[in-house]
Amino acid sequence: MKQQRESIYANLARSLSELLPSLPTRPEAILMISAHWEEEIFTVQGHSNPGMIYDYFGFPEHTYSVKYPAPGHSALANKVCELLNNASLSARVDVTRGYDHGMYSPMALIDPKAQIPVVQLSLKQGLDPLAHIKVGRVLEPLRSQGILIVGSGLSYHNLRAFGILGKEASARFDSWLLHSVVEQTGKDRTERLLHWEDAPSAREAHPREEHLIPLMVAVGASESEKGHLIYHEEDFVGLTVSSFRFGS
């Protein structure tokens, strides 16, 4: 069973493990927007050594003892909060918040030794695409300061039609998403993403869009830059899924 699971995730795992070596320089810290954290206002994780949040149910017992001991970065948390508040995007720091699995699941492959500090930024309740694109725009300067901005979600997230049941819907939506993110830039790309609900099979792919919205922050932080497809699979347990990267 373990070998079967590893086989299913092999291509995704390889893509995540290749992220850091593919960058021009190793980031000083990572700012991660996870699909698994929503707050009334944008909230930044400020704990210097965040604990673990096992925000799932019915998983194998060993998954509730997973540890990912990456340090936090309180200075970065405060900087993010300051930037957002100065841009009239209300934000606060939460010094108690731990790491959720939207963070440590990919980071365990991106940085297995957990050496790079990671700060999580919440989504804002309501999941307004424009609000999250604006956040990305405000945070864009951090990229030139050694901060890697990562949106953690899934390009298809309908748990009631997962696997083969989502085959056609995931393929239709992924085709639109790939065209929008990779073949468009600037205002054209932003405009398409703001109206993502008009895409083919949009609500079949995302009955609730929390797994899509982290992409909006990443796009906002790289609005004029080309998007690159870095992971694509047409049989991820029957689904078509993709990941993207922006900039060099």
Image: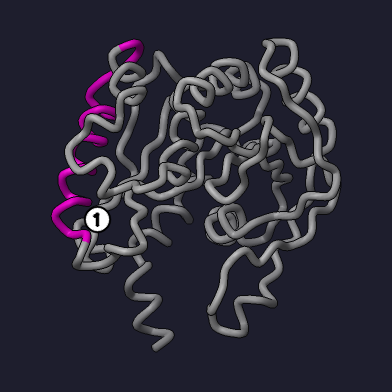
* Residue 175 magenta: yes
Position in image of residue 174 (x %, y %): 23, 43
The image quadrant that residue 227 belongs to is top left
Name the foreground residue: 67 vs 86: 86
For the stretch drawn in magenta, what is the main secondary structure?
helix
Name the foreground residue: 178 vs 17: 178
- The residue shown at (70%, 62%) is 53
- Asked whether residue 198 is in view, the answer is yes
- Asked whether residue 30 is in view, the answer is no
| In the image, residue 237 above or below residue 46 | below
Position in image of residue 196 (x %, y %): 30, 30
* Residue 236 magenta: no
Q: How is the image coloured?
A: one colour
Position in image of residue 44 (x %, y %): 73, 36
Q: Which residue is mark 1?
A: 233
On the picture, is 231 further left or further right than 148? Answer: left
- The residue shown at (27%, 63%) is 161
> Dot 1: what SS?
strand
Count all numbered tags in the image, as a single digit. 1
On the picture, is 164 further left or further right than 5? Answer: left
Tell me if mark 1 has few (under 14), some (14-19) or many (20+) residues whose alpha carbon lies within 10 angstroms of its own. Answer: some
On the picture, is 32 further left or further right than 232? Answer: right
Report the amino acid beneath label 1.
Glu
- The residue shown at (49%, 22%) is 133
- The residue shown at (74%, 16%) is 85
The image quadrant that residue 162 belongs to is bottom left
- Give, as a single range, the part of the protein colored magenta: 166-187
Position in image of residue 157 (x %, y %): 36, 53
| In the image, residue 209 above or below residue 16 | above
In which quadrant is the N terminus drawn? Answer: bottom left
